[in-house]
Image: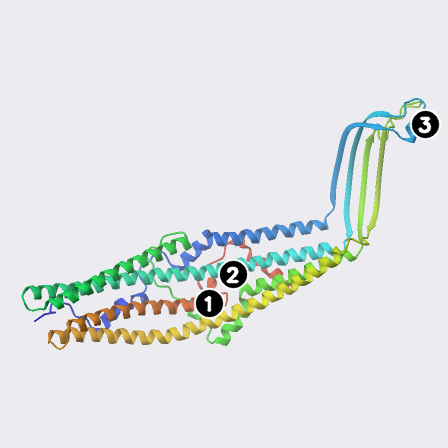
Amino acid sequence: MLNFSHVVKKKRVATLILAMSLSSPAAMSQTLEQAVARSLESHPQIRQAFARYKAREQAIEQAEAGYYPTLDATAGVGWERTDTPATRRDTTTDDEVDLTRRELGVSLRQVLFDGFRTQNEVSRTENEATAEQWALIATAEDKALEVAKVYLDVLVADEVVTLAEKNLENHQEIYDAIKESNEGGFAKASDLSQVTGRLARANANLMSARNNLADARSTFTKMVGATPENLHLPRPDEAMLPSSLDTLMARALEKHPRLRSAQADIAAANAARDGSRAAYLPEFNLEVDANWNDNVGGEDGAGPPDVGGENNNVQAMVRMRYNLFNGGADRARERQTAYQTIEAREINEMAHRDVIEGAKLAWNARTYLEQQRDFMRQHVEAATDTRDAYREEFRLNARTLLDVLDSQNELFETRREYLSKEADERYAQYRILNATGELLASLRVDMPASWDTESLTGQEREQ
């Protein structure tokens, strides 16, 4: 008769320690907050978004240059051959005069009125920069959620390896006992064959778990830029979690950075449309020109009397330019910007739908995962009791070896699924925080100073 006395029996509470070990903080050297902060500093997608934002900032300075005067200098020296009525009337020279021509000039242009083109161009670029700034923050929020996912994945994969190792140990103990009993003539060869196959399956489960852990660690390293070390299950800030779906929806529509980015894009499109209408108005400029030329037009000023070849002048003019016809380009440009405004509004509408959908999905996931977790805990408890009871009944010849092995495998699968559901529930909470655009705030992760988030208030001023 097979004797399991060498197998240590554990109480029900102890059987759940492994399955619920993710719920207990451990000594750590790499928190989720640290992993997110590192990812924000080093991930290429974040750096790309940051570069786009800074490029838009430079466009603002380009647009603001329209408020300032332009100053140009010209200079030149060379040969000029001149044949004009003036040279032909001069009987002291040939009809054609060859001279060394010299030029020096300075021009100042100041726009006085350009149909509000510059004003609207500045507004457009400011709103485009604001949109990119919010897009940068949205990218950071999404990246933080991705880091939370891979962080939890590593934790779960690591615990599943521990479960698989324990499962293999249990199968090995049963195998050793069956083999010893078979050699003594007390166990059938079919029992040994069955347990040998189940032992092989337990080994395969362990190899699969280790492979999944290696994959999870690789994904973590790619996302964070560092290998995972001494992780522990993070706890979302429950105080920042909405108390109801209505509260979640209201906060999402108010604060989500994707929506703010889309709203800034609408403002930029409106400014571009207004700027296109500047072509229908005249432009007024103050123009100051000064020229110091020598030997121009074949006149060297030779005597008698010799007055020199200098030809100098200074003029200050206010000039109006008004385009009367340019082939219909202005009308086409206005229609183009009108369609771009429609496009921006539809993008904003799509962003609203995406945010609403994301918020509802996150809320539903947490709600149902909480319920699933409770049932899964009951399943783990029941599977543990079943496994222990089957072992005792097998010892009394009331159960077959196959029953015992099935109960052991069911317990392993149940514990593994419980770990996954528990992590999924935590991830759903982070999804809710991400849906409101407050995930980084809940993690107490400050955005880099170079992101200059204070300038975001400029969007509200424009609106």
Q: Earlier in the sequence, mark 1 or mark 2?
A: 2
Q: Secondary structure at mark 3?
A: helix
Quarter placement of the N terminus: bottom left
Q: Which mark is residue 89?
A: 3
Q: In the figure, is residue 277 to the left or right of 51?
A: right
Q: Residue at x 15, y 73 (%)?
A: 391
Q: Amino acid at mark 1?
A: Leu
Q: Secondary structure at mark 1?
A: helix
Mark 2 crowdedness (10 Å alpha carbons): few <14, some 14-19, many ≥20 = many
Q: Residue at x 23, y 69 (%)?
A: 409
| Quadrant of residue 408 within the rendered picture | bottom left
Measure the alpha-carbon separation of dots 3 and 1: 90 Å
Between 424 and 337, which is closer to the camera in this rendering?
Answer: 337
Mark 1 crowdedness (10 Å alpha carbons): few <14, some 14-19, many ≥20 = many
Badge 2 is on which residue? 138
Q: In the figure, is residue 329 to the left or right of 229?
A: right
Q: Are marks 2 and 3 in contact (CB under 8 Å)?
A: no
Q: From this viewpoint, is residue 444 visible?
A: no
Between 221 and 229, which is closer to the camera in this rendering?
Answer: 221
Q: Are marks 3 and 1 in contact (CB under 8 Å)?
A: no
Q: Earlier in the sequence, mark 2 or mark 3?
A: 3
- The image shows residue 450 at horizontal and vertical percentages of 53, 52
Q: Secondary structure at mark 2?
A: helix
Of badges 3 and 1, nearer the viewer stands: 3
Of badges 2 and 3, nearer the viewer stands: 3
Relative height, residue 306 to residue 377 (above, below): above
Badge 1 is on which residue? 433
Tally the numbered discs: 3
Q: Amino acid at mark 2?
A: Ala
- The image shows residue 443 at horizontal and vertical percentages of 44, 62
